[in-house]
Amino acid sequence: MKGKEINWSELPFGYVKADYNVRCTYKDGEWGPIEVSDSEYVSLHIASSCLHYGQESFEGLKAFRGKDGKVRVFRMEENAKRFIRSAEGIAMQPMPVEKFCEMVRMVVKLNENIIPPYGTGASLYIRPLEIGISPKVGVSPSSEYMVIMLVTPVGPYFKTGFKPGRVCLSREYDRVAPKGTGSIKIGGNYAASLVAGEKAHQLGYGVMLYLDPKEKKYLDECGAANFYGVKGNTYVTPASETILPSITNKSLRQIARDMGMNVEERHILYDELKDFDEVGACGTAAVCSPIGEIVDIDNGTKFEYGMDTVGPVTQKLYDTIRGIQNGEIEDKHGWTEIIEFD
Ligand code: PLP
Ligand code: COI
């Protein structure tokens, strides 16, 4: 796909073929050179540990074309560190931060033609993934690994765009186990969320909001995003060992503090849903997406926040984080790296 053939403003959050991806293999105790590929396929041993036992982790980060024409990648060292935690969480070889960052810079530069223009609302989504590639029949970790980074230009994650969406909640589904893998980004968590996600879609909701898997009392993950609520001058988000520590949420918490808000990371009781002025879902793909209503599909209780307008705090958080990503607002925390094109 050539950049000039893409209708940037209408892009969904989907896959568009890029000219190149980059790959790096861990073999004989060391990471090899970064290789450039123009193939959309990988050739795997039929007994690879990723295929049988789910030794797979991934990341998601974005590059943005700013008003000044520069391309900025948002907080890639944070993704690199989480990629290490995810690898360690399923006994894979972690990739050093610097190698990860080198691969990100390379894959962005190689695909300059599909970095969405400023002002279209679209961005370049970077998807790193790691897989165990040694043949395994007994259940044990691979000795060889491959990291692949692909890119695709994306638009808004939710079909509604930056407008309030509808979310459902149910106690019938767990995304992860209480002491399981919820705080790392591995494919298995997402496989385990597909049935709940499809249920939400069938019923006309964007995503499923989970309660904590142990007591079913506290708000947990919101689909593939973190949950946050706003009450007066306070930004509240779950402190939970079963949610992914979102880099977007961490950034929004800092922005909220910079705005003079109180920030609370704590368990949030289900009953508190009725008290929030605004609620939303945040993540790289979701940015901060307003939620207009949450319906408890187990008992029909509806929590309404307004389907017509975006709350002022969510709007300000969104404008600020997107402004930093586009280079329009001063990046005083040093979150972005400008990619130098030769
Ligand atoms: N929670 C889950 C389950 C996710 O998949 C994601 C997406 O990465 C997030 C939260 C948000 O994390 P981040 O802001 O680092 O993208
Ligand atoms: C992200 O926000 O980057 C995600 O990973 C969400 C989803 C596409 C898995």
Image: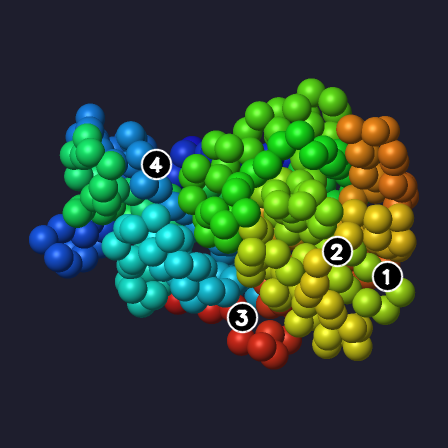
Side (left or right) of 63 relative to 234: left
- Residue drawn at point x = 18 percent, y = 57 percent: 31
Q: Which residue is mark 2?
A: 268
Residue 231: assigned label: 1
- Residue drawn at point x = 48 percent, y = 61 percent: 73
Of badges 3 and 4, the one in the foreground is 4
In the rendering, at what x and y percent does residue 192 appear? Answer: 51, 33
Q: Which residue is mark 3?
A: 335
Residue 303 figure quarter: top right
Mark 3 falls on what kind of element? loop
Of badges 3 and 2, the one in the foreground is 2
On screen, 97 above or below 215?
below
Of the two numbered discs 3 and 1 on the same chain, state the one appearing first in sequence: 1
Residue 118 shows in this picture: no
Of the two numbered discs 2 and 1 on the same chain, state the one appearing first in sequence: 1
Mark 3–mark 2 Cα distance, whole angstroms, equals: 28 Å
Give, as a three-letter code, the residue at label 2. Ile
Give, as a three-letter code, the residue at label 1. Lys
Q: Which residue is mark 4?
A: 54
Mark 1–mark 4 Cα distance, whole angstroms, equals: 40 Å
